[in-house]
């Protein structure tokens, strides 16, 4: 399991109902079921990953964040998780709204477009930045809605979501020391993980 | 038809059409060993023209069981771990009450066309009586494809506390207009055969073989796909054993695909009864689980505790993925624990019966995961 997934798992209380949107190979839901006794389910867009997950006995549904969340009833989960996907969905604000409709909490991780390396590349070269995290050229990237940590916080404020916890981490998921300053985190954090709830 | 293992329920069954069917005969086969606490039973529901001989040679044709590749020792539906039951559907022709069984203990005449119309729900009610008779209070799983999948959904809707896991494969919550249309052409082919005798062909010592064969040929096309037909036959011409082209008459078996379909038709006639075919296709046409619940499919599964795994195939145009997705979303609305996967295959609807490793993995994995959640220590 990736380190950022471990950080997400630590935000989730044992024995709760969890929906992982973009569950990939199912590592997180498997971990949550086995170590935390959660009723954890997944939605995944890649059919190969869905088949592999079900073949491992995990409850995963083929679908995506933009089109399938609307079919879940209100408050059907304690947590709805969206890993590294917010920037790739068609309507990020609507996806967040759906997540906090069907779940009491939302756990969202995304790559931070405000990282200093990206800012520097754009400033010095005048071209779209390319880094380890943002590694596909602009004309091929599925990441159509990149945002910074401050952008995301502004959206949460606008939508009236409460940020219970947040972390800024480097690509490997190591916790970074700038967690007390949002401005520093927005400059030095490569990814962010947020735990939100409705007001 | 007493050569098939069966149980007779003298109390009978109230059918949806209002007729009380008594006695009720339920023919079935079982494989593996039932656990002392009866926790390891899996019911496999068969599609339209299959029967209870799921994992052993067929008594009439001698061919391997229709899902022998899926059910057996060490197979994805593992008879070393599970007690697997397969029931001949009500209206069938392999021992369960239907057009070819006697009306009652006192009246040995066969039902024929006067067999009452049955529904998927009636079929499931009959299965439930057998399951109870076998001492099983909760099935670990109910699994089936096509019409078998309809039975799985009916089980889930009618007996949510008596099923732990459900796997509807290549199916839908209702029979579409297109599918009813195909069934109607099949039935008209049977009616048009002079040997049908308005359904009284047995009394006349006849069999509507032409009509039933044409029905099967037409239906068989809907089970395949254009890619599968092209890959298997293309435009290839049949050759005589002498090496020459098989011409014969203008409408003789010229193309390989024709020869294949004719073989499918004629071999089907040897093992299936025309009146059963009519009865069962009608049962499929009636099926509309959402309509039975005021048009809201999700309410059929409200607060269901069952774990579902919905499976479809990319090239299945008889029960397309869109219908499985509709079903999966209805299950989501009901708050059900549902997995849903569309398996990539070019073999059409029949893919669920064929060698599709992804289906094997899906079934094995879903059963394994469900067994873990059910606390089955086997």
Image (tube, rainbow, N blue to C red):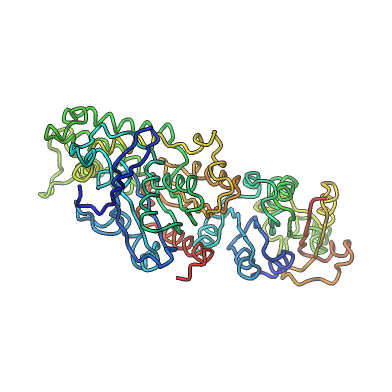
Q: Nearer the viewer, residue B59 or B192?
A: B59
Q: Nearer the viewer, residue A97 or A86?
A: A97
Q: Tell me where residue A183 appears, x and y as whole percent.
A: 89, 61
The answer to whether A166 appears left or right of B194 in the picture is: right
Res. B282 image quadrant: top left
Q: Tell me where residue B130 appears, x and y as whole percent.
A: 35, 52
Quadrant including the N terminus of chain A: bottom right
Relative height, residue A51 to residue A67 (above, below): below
Q: Tell me where residue A42 appears, x and y as whole percent.
A: 60, 57
Relative height, residue B252 to residue A196 (above, below): above
Q: Tell me where residue A114 appears, x and y as whole percent.
A: 82, 59
Relative height, residue B189 to residue B320 (above, below): above
The answer to whether B112 appears left or right of B161 in the picture is: left
Res. B75 image quadrant: bottom left
Res. B98 image quadrant: top left
Residue B256 appears in the picture as rendered: no
User: Across the whole image, how many numbered discs are drawn on residues?
Assistant: 0
Q: Nearer the viewer, residue B131 or B172?
A: B131
Image point (31%, 55%), residue name: B54
Image point (75%, 58%), residue name: A129
Which residue reaches farthest left? Answer: B242
Image point (72%, 47%), residue name: A101
Residue B321 appears in the picture as rendered: yes
């Amino acid at each position: 399991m990736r380190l950022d997934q471990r950080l997400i798992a630590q935000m989730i209380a044992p024995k709760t109902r969890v929906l992982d949107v973009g569950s990939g190979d199912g590592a997180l839901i498997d971990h949550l079921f086995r170590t935390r006794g959660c009723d954890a389910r997944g939605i995944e867009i890649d059919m190969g990953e869905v088949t592999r997950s079900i073949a491992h006995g995990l409850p995963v549904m083929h679908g995506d964040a933009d089109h399938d969340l609307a079919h879940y009833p209100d408050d059907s989960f304690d947590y709805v998780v969206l890993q590294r996907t917010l920037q790739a969905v068609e309507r990020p604000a609507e996806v967040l709204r759906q997540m906090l409709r069907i779940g009491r909490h939302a756990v969202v991780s995304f790559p931070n477009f405000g990282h200093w390396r990206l800012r520097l590349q754009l400033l010095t070269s005048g071209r779209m930045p390319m880094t380890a995290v943002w590694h596909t050229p602009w004309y091929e990237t599925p990441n159509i809605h990149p945002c910074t940590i401050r952008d995301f916080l502004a959206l949460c404020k606008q939508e009236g979501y409460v940020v219970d916890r947040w972390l800024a981490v480097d690509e490997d998921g190591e916790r970074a020391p700038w967690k007390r300053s949002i401005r520093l985190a927005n400059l030095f954090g490569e990814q962010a993980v947020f735990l939100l709830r409705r007001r | 038809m007493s050569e098939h293992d069966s149980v007779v329920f003298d109390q009978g069954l109230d059918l949806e059409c209002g007729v009380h069917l008594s006695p009720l005969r339920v023919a079935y086969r079982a494989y593996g060993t039932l656990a002392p606490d009866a926790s390891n039973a899996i019911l496999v529901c068969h599609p339209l023209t299959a029967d209870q001989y799921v994992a052993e040679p067929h008594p009439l044709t001698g061919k391997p069981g229709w899902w022998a590749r899926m059910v057996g020792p060490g197979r994805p539906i593992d008879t070393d771990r599970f007690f697997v039951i397969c029931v001949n559907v009500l209206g069938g022709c392999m021992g369960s009450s239907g057009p070819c069984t006697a009306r009652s203990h006192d009246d040995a005449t066969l039902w024929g066309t006067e067999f009452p119309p049955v529904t998927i729900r009636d079929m499931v009610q009959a299965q439930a009586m057998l399951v109870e008779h076998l001492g099983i209070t909760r099935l670990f799983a109910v699994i089936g494809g096509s019409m078998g999948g309809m039975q799985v959904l009916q089980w889930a809707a009618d007996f949510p506390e008596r099923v732990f896991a459900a796997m509807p494969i290549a199916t839908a919550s209702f029979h579409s207009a297109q599918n009813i249309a195909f069934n109607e052409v099949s039935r008209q082919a049977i009616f048009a055969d002079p040997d049908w005798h308005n359904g009284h062909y047995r009394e006349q010592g006849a069999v509507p073989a032409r009509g039933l064969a044409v029905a099967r040929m037409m239906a068989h096309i809907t089970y395949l796909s254009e890619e599968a037909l092209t890959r298997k036959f293309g435009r290839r011409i049949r050759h005589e054993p002498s090496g020459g082209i098989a011409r014969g008459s203008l409408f003789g078996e010229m193309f390989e695909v024709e020869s294949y379909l004719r073989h499918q038709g004629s071999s089907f006639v040897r093992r299936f009864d025309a009146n059963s075919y009519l009865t069962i296709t009608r049962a499929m046409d009636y099926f509309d689980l959402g309509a039975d619940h005021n048009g809201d499919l999700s309410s059929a599964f409200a607060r269901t505790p069952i774990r579902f795994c919905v499976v479809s195939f990319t090239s299945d145009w008889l029960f397309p993925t869109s219908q499985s997705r509709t079903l999966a979303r209805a299950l989501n609305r009901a708050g059900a624990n549902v997995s849903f996967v569309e398996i990539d295959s070019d073999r059409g609807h029949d893919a669920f019966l064929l060698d599709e490793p992804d289906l094997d993995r899906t079934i094995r994995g879903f059963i394994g995961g469900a067994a873990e959640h059910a606390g089955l220590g086997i």
